[in-house]
Image (cartoon, rainbow, N blue to C red):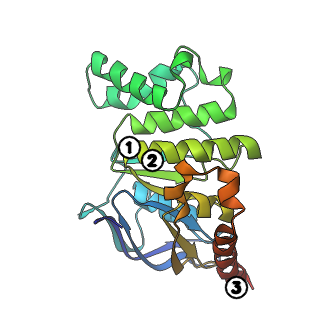
Amino acid sequence: MGRSILEIDEVMMEYPSSDGPVTALERVSLAIGEGDFVCLVGPSGCGKTTLLRIIAGFVLPTAGQVRLDGEPILGPDYQRGVVFQHPALYPWLTVQANVEFGPKMRGLPSARRRELAEHHLRMVRLWDFRTKTPYELSGGMQQRVAIARVLANDPRILLMDEPFGALDALTREHLQEELLKIWKATGKTVFFITHSVEEACYLATTIFVMSARPGRILASIEAPFSRQAATQDSRAVKSSPEFVALREQVLRYIWETES
């Protein structure tokens, strides 16, 4: 683990309801090191997306604090790029214009915007589709555009909320491999939410397991497979005894918290 760039300190989140406050998160604390690929897993409704929204600055916690590079997070910022489950692309813009949108809003000149768009679209192997609009692309291609669009802003941390959850199994596996290549090429820190324990074991350097609501961190588990993935076939990795043992370890935590 590199030096901590994201620190979550005793975060609590309550939502009002007709029956009184509902606690979504309870005293969540964790630290994420620079260059880490962190996966967050846990039962449905445990507060995973709520925690991501707090890190993104979309909502403020009821108590506690989140800091990026030592500075409190008080609102949205391009330093925390978000990739959602369903690609939030502008349907009236071309692929290239979608990727250039963030740098354009930041006032970068057109030549630099084009340079960034080309670099990141080539990274996700979609430069040849730069003149297409999102509806002309498959779901997997749209998600790759969404990743390129976030990376074009050069964020300190990439927040991903079940980005492959709506895709078919084969496309999902291909994108897992592509995401690991992008992570290794860019050195970005990644915070990734998933319901798939197998996906977490394959992608993560560290897996955080959350309890059922109110969400708390039950365990922090180191995972070695993301750093090995470039040299081994993904199916060989996922069928190895070591991978199966890790998957079962994570599943046991989740099953115990649901029982």
Lateral position of residue 74 relative to residue 58, left or right: left
Query: In the rendering, at what x and y percent does residue 37 appear?
Result: 46, 58
Q: Which dot marks residue 256? A: 3
Q: Is residue 183 left or right of residue 42?
A: left
Q: Position of residue 131 (x, y in %)?
A: 54, 13
At numbered mark 3, what does the secondary structure look like: helix, strand or loop?
helix
Q: Amino acid at mark 1?
A: Thr
> What residue is pinned by disc 1?
186
Q: Quadrant of residue 249?
A: bottom right
Q: Which residue is pictured at 66% across the width and 24% down the height? A: 137
Residue that appears at 43% across and 47% down: 184
Number of marks: 3
Confirm or deny contact between disc 2 and disc 3 (CB under 8 A): no
Choose top left, top right, bottom left or bottom right for residue 12: bottom left
Question: Is 203 situated left or right of 6 in this image?
Answer: right
Asked if disc 1 and disc 2 are in contact, CB closer than 8 Å, the reply is yes
Q: CA distance from mark 2 to mark 3?
A: 32 Å
Q: Nearer the viewer, residue 178 or 233?
A: 233
Tell me which residue sits at (72%, 62%) in the image. 239
Q: CA distance from mark 1 to mark 2?
A: 5 Å
x, y percentage for residue 244?
A: 70, 70
Task: Name the residue at the top extreme.
Answer: 131
Return the residue nearer the eye: 238 or 91: 238
